[in-house]
Image (cartoon, rainbow, N blue to C red):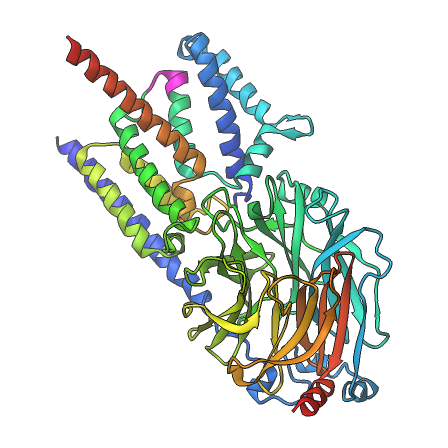
Amino acid sequence: MIPDDFFPYLSAALIVASLFSIIANRIYPIFRWAPQYKLLFLIASSLLALIPFGGISAARMLVSFNYSYSMGLIIILLVTVIKIFFNVLLFSHQDSLYLSIFNIVLGIILYTTSLGFIPYDIYYYGYNFWPLFFIIFVLIIIPVFAGSRLQWVFIAYILGWNLKLIPSPNFFDYLIDPLLFFISTGIVVSHMIKSARTTGINGGT
Amino acid sequence: MRFKLTVKIVTVLFVSFLYWISAYSIPQEEGRLVGIPSIPPPLMGGGEGEGQKGEGEQKGFSDEKARYNNVDFYKEGLVNPGSKVPSSHVSSLTWMGDGKIACVWYGGSREGAMDVKIYFSLYDENTGVWSEGNVVVSRESSSDELGRYVRKVGNPVIFSDSSDRLWLFYVTITVGGWSGSSLNYKISYDHGKTWTPSKKLVLSPFFNLSNLVKNKPMLLDGGGFLLPIYHEFINKYPEMLMVIPDGDAVQYKKWRIGFKKGLLQPSILALDEKRVVAYFRNAGKGNKKYVMESISNDAGMTWSEPLPTTLPNPNSGLDVVSTPEGSVLVVLNDSFKDRSRLALYLSKDNDREWIKIKDLEDTPGMEFSYPSIIRTPDNTYHISYTYNRSNIKHVTFSDIWLLEKLKNDS
């Protein structure tokens, strides 16, 4: 039996570790470090999330603002950390982009309805099996035959929900949270800017 | 090529297996989350003393007490007369059996202050005295139990379920005002002497924001209950939370009561096995606002379009309870402008015609608000409400008093 707070605190520690890793990676690429330094850095940055500063730790503050983070966020953070530490790309750039677009569309629909902008209670369907799971099933089958690794993300969602890894009975909370929504928006916006620049450069030559 | 195809087939088989597991587990949970309202005693055709509590508990009433309850009486007093804090607000009452009533409220230097705590007090019907209020939740205790930073606590609701467990729901805020609230609960198995650690409910996908509670739930036959809650971040709307106890944990799901905005703090009442009525605080636009009403014909799952009653509402909370004759009693601020008057109204047969029974309070410049009303199995009504923000007032009267009042008025 996994304690209710295990996953929220794991995700909070991962958020802090990812932030430190991104900063450190900019100074000197981490994948070139010796394995023992990598391990030490990862443990130290995760512990920093749990040590209280001014009476409250960064992890506790993060889980205070959002009670539980989604599995989608945990996957994105793990992919980022693995890329930084081992220079191994688990998802192609295209996969990350598709997943981010899925997150943005889902987030917009979910948040606009749950905040009352649209008179429809879509969050309620997260308590029931069939309507939402059917969509996820399709989202798994398409990547399987398209040769994409995104299928594993959606499989992880279903697995996590069956194992009740997150302290929420609603399947939507496994798919998305506001932080993941903002990160996904950042990924898509940065892709659009890069694409625009590339088009501009190509157009100029 | 053959290897890749094998991987794809294995993946599809694995996904199908996962779906089979999920599909197998869900309907069982769904089955547990179905229930019908516990019918109030008079509607079940029960006699005097038959109610939500078991027969054994009814035998606890002495003959002297039974006589006491058959007399015409109306009493009032303060729940916390010697309150050590300047501000008290949002009280909630519940019957605990053996002539005991529990009351919870929050108090501190002012509403929303960081020193606000949730207090618990017991009333003994035999002595007519409230015990001194004990702190059951502070922001520090809540923060420790939840493993989260808690900036302030508020809005407690207490009730006793069919298994004699005492439930305390309350809200916590990490950042911002009341619209940033999230919902937590504690359980007591010994009539409020000790409580389980607080647990938080995840009820909203957006930072778990804006889930508040004000009124008592409606019990379900399977041991669960329907708790009326509401959302007030950006838009205001009422919601229904179904809770099925599972040891110290709970299974739960929530849904919206219609899509009309500007309605808050629903108070619900079972009219029969399937029909439920909800009354709402009106936080909509306009100067002349009325209490809104909605009906459910499937035990609270779906609701009719909310319609205005003839009861005025100055954007303030109210509470309802049923009488043995099946009438609806409501306590509310019957004013369009402020909370300086608090009154008791009755509607026979839920026909939307309301008779004023009594002005409980009427002093311009003062505030009387957030009422909570219950009817106990010994034929007594108890009302608690905020008395000018400084104390919690308690009013109690008998069935006979109510009948006499109605007789005299007619």
Residue B63 position within the rendered picture, expressed as x and y whole percent measured from the top left? 81, 88
Q: Magenta span has B129? A: no
Looking at this view, is B408 or B248 the one in front? Answer: B408
In the displayed structure image, the side of residue B196 where residue B225 appears, left or right: left
Q: Is residue A13 above or below residue B221?
A: above
Residue A86, by quadrant, is top left
Residue B62, by quadrant, is bottom right
Q: Which quadrant holds the C terminus of chain A?
A: top left
Q: Magenta span has A87? A: yes
Q: Residue at x 75, y 44 (%)?
A: B115
Looking at this view, is B250 or A86 the one in front? Answer: B250
Residue B215 appears in the picture as rendered: yes
Q: Is residue A200 above or below residue B34?
A: above
Looking at this view, is A36 or B139 the one in front? Answer: B139
Residue B210 position within the rendered picture, expressed as x and y whole percent measured from the top left? 53, 49
Residue B153 position within the rendered picture, expressed as x and y whole percent measured from the top left? 67, 48
Q: Residue at x 45, y 46 (%)?
A: B205
Q: Residue at x 18, y 34 (%)?
A: A146
Residue range corresponding to the magenta coloring:
A83-88
